[in-house]
Amino acid sequence: MVNEEKTNKDSPKGPSRIFVVFGALALCFTLIGGIYFAVGPDRFSSFFDPSFKISKQTSTASKGAQIGGPFELVDHAGAVITNADYADKFTLIYFGYTYCPDVCPTSLTTMTDALKSLGSKAKDIVPLFITVDPKRDTVEQLRMYISHFHPRLVGLTGTEEQVAKAAKAFRVYFAKQKESAPGANDYLVDHSSIVLFIGQKGQILTHFGHAVSAEAMAERLQKFL
Ligand code: NI
């Protein structure tokens, strides 16, 4: 027995067989890990969860029908902004409106806290707040509103057509509700409350629901930086 073991150990075949086994195992882990990081945790989990609808959209996106695309809007300083202004940057995009009573301020606070906790690591991420209510969200109104959130937050508005085009490009739904009385300016706007994280080549990297915590958002963003 002792001799046999010794022979096995000393023979060139023993160790090389071990290397083959370990090599195969390492390759498996690398492949699974690679897929995980390539597609992101959401889409990775979506392989096992067919009810994950947003992920289906992003899967389609990777096949050519990209989320995002050319847009032209006006920022909170009155400057014309297009998607080309953010080439080579990451963008963290939220569509909403400044008169939103609840969800928008919460989402923007979460984005702000997440970016602040990442500190200088988040320097290449541009947070964008794109209004779905350009009628009331003027340049002036946006400038005042975004001052409550992250110092680098960019507010974007435009004509109704420009805003509709941007929302469509990012597959964001919005619909203006009826005023309390004809001509009153107190309407609500239904809208998707998803935070989109877009990569440096304009590809969607991940997205967050409005219930996400700042900690969870920061943790996931960090993986892409
Ligand atoms: Ni809102």
Image (cartoon, helix red, strand yellow):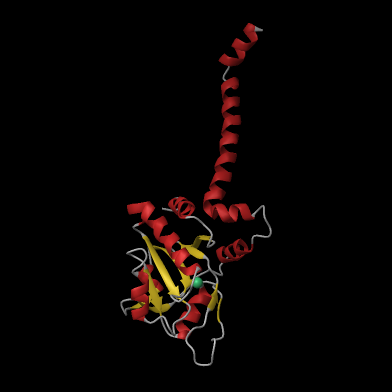
Q: Residue at image x 32%, y 53%?
A: 120
Relative horizontal placement of residue 89, taking residue 27 as reference (left or right): left
Q: Residue furthest right?
A: 50
Q: Residue furthest bottom?
A: 182
Between 115 and 66, the residue placed more toward the observer is: 115
Q: Which image quarter: residue 141?
A: bottom left
Q: Is residue 137 above or below residue 107?
A: below
Q: Residue furthest top?
A: 2
Between 219 and 55, the residue placed more toward the observer is: 219
Residue 199: percent from left, percent from top: 45, 61
Q: How many marks?
A: 0
Relative horizontal placement of residue 22, taking residue 200 as reference (left or right): right
Q: Is residue 76 above or below residue 217?
A: below
Q: Residue at image x 57%, y 55%?
A: 42
Residue 7 visible in the picture: yes
Residue 98: percent from left, percent from top: 43, 75
Q: Which image quarter: residue 86?
A: bottom left
Q: Is residue 182 above or below residue 162?
A: below
Q: Which image quarter: residue 63?
A: bottom right
Residue 202 visible in the picture: no
Relative horizontal placement of residue 116, taking residue 131 as reference (left or right): left
Is the N terminus in the top left, top right, bottom left or bottom right quadrant?
A: top right
Residue 189: percent from left, percent from top: 53, 78
Q: Residue at image x 63%, y 55%?
A: 46
Q: Residue furthest front?
A: 181
Residue 144: percent from left, percent from top: 34, 74
Between 170 and 217, the residue placed more toward the observer is: 217
